Image: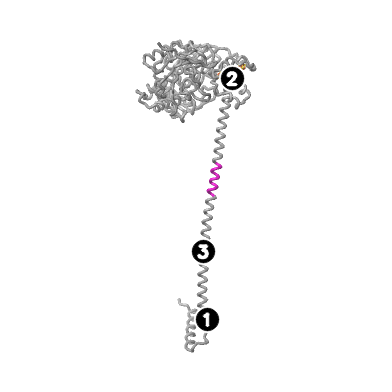
């Protein structure tokens, strides 16, 4: 007999219609290879990858086409064989609709692959070597914002990971790719989880799956018993939106509250998605990098709704056409689900690593206009992050970006529950996104101006140093000149002394001559000799020897 697992609950949340059956009626089927792939260099949180290929180069499937650029970055691989035709700015799926740098690969349909290097016994690998392999395979979180998985698999030197939580909740309406993956590849998911446990050195793992996925639950349960795994627990949880939020799921399964502005790791828990686990299995056991993913194509605007294995970089328009196209009257295209997804202006953008669903709707876009807040508090009652959504709205409306942070804006997971229940039809989440974007922009500007100020201060410091060095050189030069001068003045006085001495000698000689010429007391002979000497001297001076 198994003991019932104790579950906790989180504040707020909503019971929403699932609409998941629409896309789970057929198997996911073979991968579709489009004519060309558009591969954005930025498909994850962190620095965009740097191209490793040149235009005109032929590449094989699985080959690295862009290198990781810094620690928070992962490489990008060719999803199939073909030729690089361009590296340029292209429209990418993003709420901003801005262009981003992409590698364009013209596929050749041969699907030739480079040699893969699977690891037969990962248990023998050091956890850090395992994380490096996961990084090199380009794996990012496939259930959320696309954070590089190898970083989340690093517990740090001082942190003990009590539990690895696997998110199989998939709580957002319409999205069913994780459900289908669990039905079709339960063994791969479980083996991927075991690899994660080894990387984290986490003995225990809990998989949280919503109770609206009985087939997936059964498939996982069966695989657990077939593989005889006793360190992974599969737990069914109530279907409440947004149980699939990381902090909400951890609360439900462990009772632990993740700190505001903190990480689950701070409370000894790490959370990953089931699809990430399956891609880690492929990377380690098959040596295959992340080049495709399961994506839900659904909504009343799609002729053939399904889950389909799609190559990263596949243009959405080509993919939808391949699957039968649109129903007439489609007027809204969303990447993600109806609660947390964002509108696509065009279908001529590619599927990227974080694309889990394309939702096409025919419903008329008749959003009633927003009216002033009536302070009913309904938004507060449903907020799963225990925030005060109306206060956040007021501060965002007033553009008071300091005060809004006092209300923990960054704990808002943008689940959309508050907007969903607001009787005034206020698009609350859009206000929060606007405030977050403004704060990030201000922080970016501040960082830039801090860097500019630092550069200016360094320049001033350098100029001052150079000035001091110049002054020191001048001082030394002057000192050297003065030293030379005093040496030469010493020489002058020496010269003067010599000349004075010579003068004195000359005077003495003169005096002696004068004394000699004093003839008063000379004899006649002496006088004669002197006259002769004088005569010869005169002659010598008049006729000098030649
Ligand atoms: S639900 Fe809407 S109307 Fe009610 S308090 Fe919140 S923002 Fe105001
Ligand atoms: S969008 Fe943010 S504020 Fe609104 S309910 Fe969700 S977490 Fe709360």
In the rendered image, the quadrant that contains the N terminus is: top left
Q: State the separation of the CA atoms marked 3 and 2.
A: 92 Å
Task: Decide if ligand 2 comes within 8 Å of the CB at mark 2.
Answer: yes
Earlier-in-chain disc, 3 versus 2? 2
Give the camera-side residue of 41 and 191: 191
The percent coordinates of residue 530 (x first, y second) are 48, 84
Can you tell me which quadrant of the image ligand 1 is in?
top right
Q: Using a 10 Å C-alpha cutoff, classify the residue at mark 2 as few (fewer than 14 neighbours), some (14 to 19) or many (20 or more).
A: many
Q: How is the image coloured?
A: one colour
Q: Which label sits on residue 389?
A: 2
Q: Report the residue marked by disc 3.
A: 490
Q: Is the residue under label 1 in contact with that under label 3 (CB below 8 Å)?
A: no
Asked if residue 60 lies left or right of residue 534, the reply is left
Q: Is residue 66 magenta?
A: no
The magenta segment is 459-470
Residue 393: % across, % down:
61, 21
Residues at badges 3 and 2 in contact (C-beta under 8 Å)? no
Query: Based on the displayed image, in which of its 4 quarters is residue 400 positioned?
Result: top right
Badge 2 marks a residue whose secondary structure is helix
Magenta span: predominant SS is: helix
Residue 119: image location, x then y, percent? 36, 24
- At label 1, counting other C-alpha atoms closer than 10 Å, the crowd grade (few under 14, some 14-19, many 20 or more) is few
Please determine whether, in this image, residue 119 is positioned above or below residue 212: below
Q: Which of these two is toward me, 444 or 203?
A: 203
Q: Please tell me which of labels 1 and 2 falls first in the chain.
A: 2
Q: Is 541 left, or right, of 192 in this rendering?
A: right
Instruction: Label 1: state its secondary structure.
Output: helix
Magenta segment includes 467: yes
Residue at image position (54%, 48%) is 468
Q: Residue beneath label 1, please? A: 514
| Number of numbered discs on residues | 3
């Amino acid at each position: 007999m198994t003991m019932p697992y104790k579950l906790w609950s989180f504040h707020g949340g909503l019971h929403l219609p699932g609409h998941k059956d629409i896309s789970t009626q057929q198997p996911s089927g073979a991968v579709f290879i489009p004519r060309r792939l558009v591969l954005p260099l930025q498909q994850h949180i962190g620095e965009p990858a740097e191209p490793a290929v040149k235009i005109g180069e032929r590449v094989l499937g699985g080959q690295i086409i862009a290198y990781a650029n810094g620690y928070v970055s992962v490489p990008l691989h060719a999803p199939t064989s073909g030729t690089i035709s361009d590296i340029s700015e292209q429209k990418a799926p993003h709420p901003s609709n801005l262009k981003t740098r992409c590698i364009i690969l013209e596929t050749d349909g041969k699907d030739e692959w480079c040699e893969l290097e699977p690891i037969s016994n990962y248990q023998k690998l050091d956890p850090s070597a395992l994380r490096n392999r996961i990084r090199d395979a380009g794996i990012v979180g496939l259930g959320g914002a696309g954070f590089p998985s190898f970083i989340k698999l690093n517990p740090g030197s001082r942190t003990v990971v009590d539990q690895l939580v696997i998110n199989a909740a998939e709580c957002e309406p319409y999205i069913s790719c994780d459900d289908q993956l669990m039905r079709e590849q339960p063994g791969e998911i479980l083996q991927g989880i075991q690899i994660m446990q080894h990387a984290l050195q986490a003995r225990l793992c809990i998989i949280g799956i919503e109770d609206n996925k009985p087939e997936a639950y059964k498939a996982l349960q069966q695989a657990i018993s077939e593989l005889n795994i006793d360190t992974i627990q599969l737990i069914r949880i109530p279907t409440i939106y947004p149980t699939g939020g990381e902090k909400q799921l951890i609360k439900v399964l462990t009772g632990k509250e993740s700190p505001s502005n903190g990480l689950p790791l701070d409370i000894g828990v790490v959370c990953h998605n089931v699809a990430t686990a399956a891609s880690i299995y492929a990377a380690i056991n098959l040596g295959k990098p992340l080049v495709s993913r399961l994506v839900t194509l659904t909504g009343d605007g799609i002729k053939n709704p399904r889950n389909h294995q799609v190559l990263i970089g596949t243009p959405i328009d080509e993919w939808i056409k391949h699957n039968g196209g649109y129903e007439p009257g489609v007027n809204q295209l969303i990447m993600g689900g109806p609660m947390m997804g964002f509108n696509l202006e065009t279908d001529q953008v590619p599927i990227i690593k974080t694309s889990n669903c394309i939702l096409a709707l025919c419903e008329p876009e008749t959003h009633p206009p927003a009216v002033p807040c009536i302070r009913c508090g309904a938004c507060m009652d449903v907020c799963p992050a225990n925030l005060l959504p109306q206060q956040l709205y007021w501060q965002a409306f007033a553009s008071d970006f300091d005060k809004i942070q006092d209300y923990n804006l960054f704990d808002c997971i943008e689940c959309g529950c508050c907007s969903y229940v607001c009787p005034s039809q206020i698009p609350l989440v859009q206000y929060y996104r606007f405030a977050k974007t403004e704060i990030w922009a201000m922080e970016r500007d501040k960082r830039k101006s801090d860097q500019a100020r630092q550069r200016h201060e360094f320049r001033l410091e350098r100029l001052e140093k150079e000035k001091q060095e110049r002054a020191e050189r001048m001082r030394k030069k002057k000192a050297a000149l003065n030293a030379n001068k005093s040496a030469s003045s010493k020489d002058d006085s020496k010269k003067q002394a010599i000349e004075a001495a010579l003068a004195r000698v000359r005077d003495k000689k003169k005096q002696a001559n004068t004394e000699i010429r004093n003839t008063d007391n000379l004899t006649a002979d002496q006088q004669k000799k002197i006259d002769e000497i004088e005569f010869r001297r005169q002659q010598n001076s008049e006729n000098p020897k030649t």
